[in-house]
Image (tube, grey):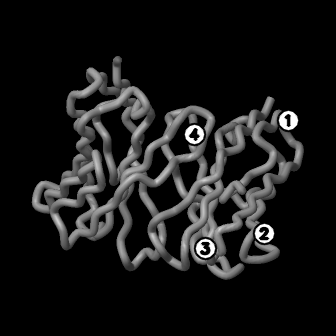
Amino acid sequence: DTAVSQTPKYLVTQMGNDKSIKCEQNLGHDTMYWYKQDSKKFLKIMFSYNNKELIINETVPNRFSPKSPDKAHLNLHINSLELGDSAVYFCASSQALGNEQFFGPGTRLTVL
Amino acid sequence: DQQVKQNSPSLSVQEGRISILNCDYTNSMFDYFLWYKKYPAEGPTFLISISSIKDKNEDGRFTVFLNKSAKHLSLHIVPSQPGDSAVYFCAASEETSGSRLTFGEGTQLTVNP
């Protein structure tokens, strides 16, 4: 009964490929997020969706496109992967605009 | 422009003693602060939070103190246990930004038996 789940846990791919990371939450939350943790361990928000609507869109290359088919899912699609995209990506969810966010286990993306 | 800073990358304490983790922020608009705990290969887990209208919040062994004038908060863990060994992240948000959290870079706490 995992609250926030992400697939895959590890993703190794070549530069230039397109890949997707999936996220699902079973907490009934209205808001979902994507964070990137870079090599310096900083956790930085990328996107936030509330009731399937984009509410936060940080300065992220447009190669990154979030998609929310319903409130329980927020997927992250990345086109034309670059070496600098290598990081751990965390999905999270919270009550509508609430501050206590629940995180998934992370997806470690390695671009070769 | 790092608005939330945790200047100690690591902290080591003996089991049973107090652990004090510190966090400084620069954005005076921040009005809600949180601490998260992270084990390797897992996502961060919410630990405790404090609103800017308070200066202290306690939950069991964990207490968070907020000094708004100094733009400083700290997390006290007492008594520390080996299972507390993890990376601790401080985070902050402002009401007008909705749910955008700004995280510090984390402090690795090691509690030695």
The kind of secondary structure element at disc 1 is strand
**Same chain letter for marks 1 and 4:** yes
Mark 4 or mark 3, earlier in chain: 3
Residue marked by disc 4: A38
Residue marked by disc 2: A67
Is there CB contact under 8 Å for labels 3 and 1? no
Q: Amino acid at mark 4?
A: Asp
Residue A52, x across and y down, in percent: 71, 79
The numbered mark at residue A31 is 3
Mark 1 or mark 4, earlier in chain: 1
* Mark 2–mark 4 distance (CA, rounded to whole Å): 22 Å
Residue A18, x across and y down, in percent: 88, 49
Residue B1 visible in the current orientation? no
Q: Chain of mark 3?
A: A
Q: Chain of mark 2?
A: A
The kind of secondary structure element at disc 3 is strand
Residue B102 visible in the current orientation? yes
Residue marked by disc 1: A13
Mark 1 or mark 2, earlier in chain: 1
Q: Residue at x 37, y 35 (%)?
A: B107
**Same chain letter for marks 4 and 3:** yes
Q: Which quadrant is home to the C terminus of chain A?
A: top right
Residue B74, x across and y down, in percent: 23, 47
**Same chain letter for marks 1 and 2:** yes
The numbered mark at residue A49 is none
**Same chain letter for marks 3 and 2:** yes
Disc nearest the viewer among 4 and 3: 3
Disc nearest the viewer among 3 and 1: 3
Q: Which quadrant is home to the N terminus of chain A?
A: bottom right
The vertical placement of B46 against A53, above or below, is: above
